[in-house]
Amino acid sequence: MERYKTRGIVLLSTKYGERDLIVQLLTEKFGIKSYLVRGARSTRGHGSKLALFQPMFCLEFDGISTTRSELDYISEVKNAFVLRTIPFDIRKSTIALFMSELIFKLVKEKEQNTELFCFIADAIQQFDCMQEGIANFHLWFVVHLLSIIGFHPGNGYSEGCQFDLQEGIYTSQPIFHDNFLCNEESQLLAYLIDSKIDELCKIKLVRGQRLAFLEKMIKFSTIHLENVGKINSLEILHDIF
């Protein structure tokens, strides 16, 4: 039996038996990893731990690995930082659900990636504090998540160019397929890449523009990554924004 400490961001939790949970975490030490949480749904003792395992909650915990089980166990667990708005704001909690599914589908790493973990943990904290530009945050997050896992434009943006999703470059040449961003979307992509979270309030978009851009960026991921599959939370996201 080996005991260790690490941090993890909650992506997915599934009921297991009457009292337990199996949770998928993006961990600071091991990348994506599954854990068994015994008694997480129990009301005995210290009560249910369910509240800790909501999408995009960042936890500090003690993990236990043993040769008797394929899954590691979580024993002691607490919030790495307290989220004050995401669990209570329907707009933010919906985006958090989308973020967790997106990470789960796009990030394939089973090993440590400190840069990725710290980017996501910092983004969560900033998102929790956001008051303006909330409706644009998921667009920014998709662009930066794809970039940090290696999928970003292979050249710089020039005015009037379009972004070819298949080639991964901006081009002024005609594109003879349907997988590209129009001029306005290409300009938006370039802006999002260079912008900080507190600048998202400056982006003025209507619902249809957000929807079209987001779906094309998801398409970009499916072109270049295998087995992404359907992002189920997109439908809920579109109902809110």
Image (tube, rainbow, N blue to C red):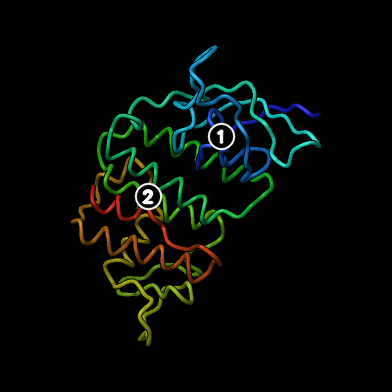
Residue displayed at 34% across by 57% down:
191
Q: Residue 183 occupies which quadrant of the picture? A: bottom left
Q: Tag 1: Cα neighbours inside 10 Å, few (<14), some, or many (≥20)?
A: few
Q: Quadrant of residue 163?
A: bottom left
Q: Residue furthest left?
A: 206
Few, some or many residues within 10 Å of mark 2 (<14, 14–19, 20+): few
N-terminal of the two: label 2 or label 1?
1
Q: What x and y, as percent, mark residue 211?
A: 27, 60
Give percent across and percent down for residue 235. 30, 55
Provide the residue designation for mark 2: 195
Q: Secondary structure at mark 2?
A: loop
Disc number lying in front (2 or 1)? 1
**Residue 192: % across, % down:** 36, 54
Position of the N terminus by quadrant: top right
Outermost residue on the top side: it is 45
Structural distance between the alpha carbons of marks 2 and 1: 45 Å
Label 1 SS = loop
| Amino acid at dot 1 | Gly
User: Which residue is nearer to you in this view: 58 or 125?
Assistant: 58
Q: Which residue lies under the disc numbered 1?
A: 17
Q: Residue at x 41, y 55 (%)?
A: 193
Q: Nearer the viewer, residue 212 or 154?
A: 212
